[in-house]
Image: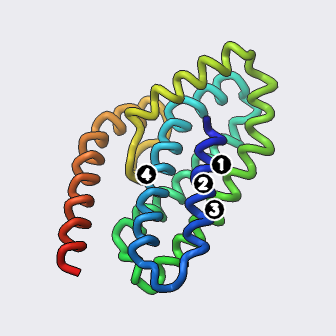
Amino acid sequence: MLTDDHRAVEKLFARFEGLGPKAHKTRQSLVEKTSQLLSTHAGIEEMVFYPDVRSKLEALNDTVLEALEEHHLVKMTLAELQGMRSEDERFAAKFTVLMECVRHHVKEEERELFPKVRKAFSRGELEALGERLLAAKSTAPKRPHPESPDTPPGNVVATALTAPLDAAANLAGAARDQVRDLVT
């Protein structure tokens, strides 16, 4: 499931990279979709995956801490992008840097972390982990919250508090987009 998320994000990145300079609406939409996908993905890794890895594989603690820092940088950049319009001079540059960071993170997870986890966890443990990750998707953040804790129990509490705010912000954004479409 985590690698499926990685592939979905990469598809959004590829679409962004293929856009022409005047595709502002599409660029904005792709960044919003990417933000939601990455926010949810980071949330489930932080609530379920990384704590399990740290408890079972103490030797990977530094790797997980680095991954958490990479998540933090991604969330900060996504939060900045939310406050920008795609026409802004630095919008595409900022998103390009985000793509580089995410691609680096994905490469490390898939080449270094995931193989070690597959080796250390039994098939049953991996299946249970997958079920918990899937269940966590429904409550995971839908928007970046770089100031929120990224480890339990703080992140679980923060997610419970921010979930209604994320839903309201997403509705407000959809309404804003409809008004903008009517005006332009």
Circle 2: residue type: Glu
Q: Which of the marked residues, 3 or 1, is nearer the chain's N terminus?
A: 1
Q: Which of the marked residues, 2 or 4, is nearer the chain's N terminus?
A: 4
- Gap in Å between the C-alphas at discs 3 and 1? 12 Å
Q: Tell me the residue at 71%/44% (across/down).
A: 109
Residue 70: which disc? 2
User: Residue 143: horizontal and vertical position, in percent?
Assistant: 38, 51
Nearer the viewer's eye, disc 1 or disc 4? 4
Nearer the viewer's eye, disc 3 or disc 1? 3
- Gap in Å between the C-alphas at discs 2 and 1? 6 Å
Q: Marks 3 and 2: CB-CB under 8 Å?
A: yes
- Gap in Å between the C-alphas at discs 1 and 4? 22 Å
Nearer the viewer's eye, disc 3 or disc 2? 3
Task: Please tell me how crowded label 4 is: few (under 14), some (14-19), or many (20+) other residues with Cα within 10 Å.
Answer: some
Nearer the viewer's eye, disc 2 or disc 4? 4
Report the residue marked by disc 3: 101
The colouring scheme, among rainbow, by chain, secondary structure or one colour, is rainbow
Q: Marks 2 and 1: CB-CB under 8 Å?
A: yes
Report the residue marked by disc 1: 66
- Which image quarter: residue 29? bottom left
Q: Tell me the residue at 49%/57% (across/down).
A: 34
Q: Marks 3 and 1: CB-CB under 8 Å?
A: no
Q: Nearer the viewer, residue 31 or 184?
A: 184
Report the residue marked by disc 4: 36
User: Residue 122: horizontal and vertical position, in percent?
Assistant: 74, 16
- Which image quarter: residue 159? top left
User: Residue 69: horizontal and vertical position, in percent?
Assistant: 58, 52
182 w.r.t. 104: above or below: below
Q: Regarding mark 3 in the picture, which secondary structure is present there?
A: helix
Circle 4: residue type: Gln
- Which image quarter: residue 51? top right
Q: Is residue 165 left or right of residue 112?
A: left
